[in-house]
Image (cartoon, rainbow, N blue to C red):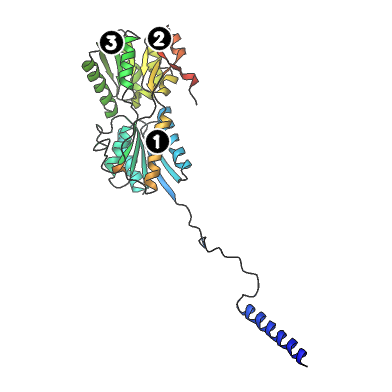
Amino acid sequence: MKRKWKKSAMALFGGAVLMLAACGSNTGAPEKEEKPDEPAQQEEAKTYKIGVTQIVEHPSLNAAFEGFKVALKEAGIQAEYDVQIAQGDNSQNTTIANNLVSGGVDLIFANSTPSAQAAASATSDIPIVFTSVTDAEGAELVESNEKPGGNVTGTVDTHPDAIPNTLKFLKEELNAKKVGMVFNSGEQNSRAQVDSIKKLIEDEGLGLEIVEASVATSADVKQAAESLVGKVDSLYTITDNTVVSALESVVAVANDNNLPMMVGEFDSVERGGLGAYGFEYYDIGYEAGEMAVKILNGEGEPADMPVQYPQNLKFVINKDTAEAIKLKVKDDWNAEDVKDLEK
């Protein structure tokens, strides 16, 4: 009798435990195991709206934009791009800048000096990151390269040694005396370069004379180049957006008249220029993209982010062009053939 009571008591106790367990659980499908360390619902990554303003289509600017996009992608930034090209029309730059501001973009990528100037005039609130700008201070985009001080910063497309090395090469290796320059005098980027070249020639006593040929549109470029024939013994084409967009017409004039033409960047060497001390526009676009990443992630503000110079400078030459103008390429120039550049 006593053993039977113990068995009954154990059965009742076990049943009570089962009932208590059942009261603490939901009927139906079993519960999923909860992970207290993980949020119940993961927050979706933000997609940023990036406005892109570019003065004109040409390989250098396109490469800079490509580098910019890759930098954002590699940093995990999800971006939607509103790309607008001014087709060389400065008045269109203003329209584009105003459209991007009214469209409520999170950041503006300004690819060229005129594009950056128009964007800076259109907003003092939206962050602006530029590239393909030669003189950020002269263009009044920043208070100083070290401390921009506003909503604008970026990367410039000139290395401190590029112009001095080019002028030295023209004088010492090409025996130049009169150098023709075709450029758009209405583009601040270009006027600044030509003025700095003239000043450097005077300060260093290089004995070179600059002969100017000004253009307003790409349609004027060939005629301007032809006007220099017989007046100069060489050409120097800087990073002028108007001229670079019609570069092949200048190359044709130079080659037909055996005029060596130094240029301001590698894409122009690939397109027929003789040579350049320069860098990859993809690289300065990528570096501008890295700056944009910091701004979008809240890790920095344009006002406190110094303007950056290109990191690498090298001499590249087009051996086919040298052959066309009957110029012997010397080993001691230490020049890379443009065909050997990584694409």
Image quadrant assignment for residue 229: top left
For residue 51, above or below residue 158:
below
Residue behind mark 3: 178
Q: Mark 1: few, some, or many residues within 10 Å (few <14, many ≥20)?
A: many
Q: Is residue 223 visible?
A: no
Residue behind mark 1: 287
Residue type at the position of mark 3: Lys
Could you tell me which residue is drawn at 35 percent across and 17 percent down?
Answer: 222
Image quadrant assignment for residue 211: top left
- Label 2–label 1 contact, CB within 8 A: no
- Callout in the foreground (1, 3): 1
The reply, left or right, for residue 62 in relation to residue 95 is right
- Callout in the foreground (2, 3): 3
Could you tell me which residue is drawn at 35 percent across and 9 percent down?
Answer: 174
Residue type at the position of mark 2: Asp
Could you tell me which residue is drawn at 36 percent across and 45 percent down?
Answer: 295
Residue nearer the viewer, 7 or 80: 7
Image quadrant assignment for residue 243: top left
| Screen quadrant of the N terminus | bottom right
Residue nearer the viewer, 287 or 331: 331
Residue behind mark 2: 256
| Residue 305, x across and y down, in percent | 31, 41
Q: Mark 2: few, some, or many residues within 10 Å (few <14, many ≥20)?
A: few
- Gap in Å between the C-alphas at discs 2 and 3? 18 Å
Q: Reading the chain from its start, which is encountered first: label 2 or label 1?
A: 2
Circle on res. 70: none
Could you tell me which residue is drawn at 41 percent across and 47 percent down?
Answer: 49
Q: Secondary structure at mark 2?
A: helix
Q: Residue furthest front?
A: 2
Q: Is residue 45 visible?
A: yes
Q: Reading the chain from its start, which is encountered first: label 2 or label 3?
A: 3
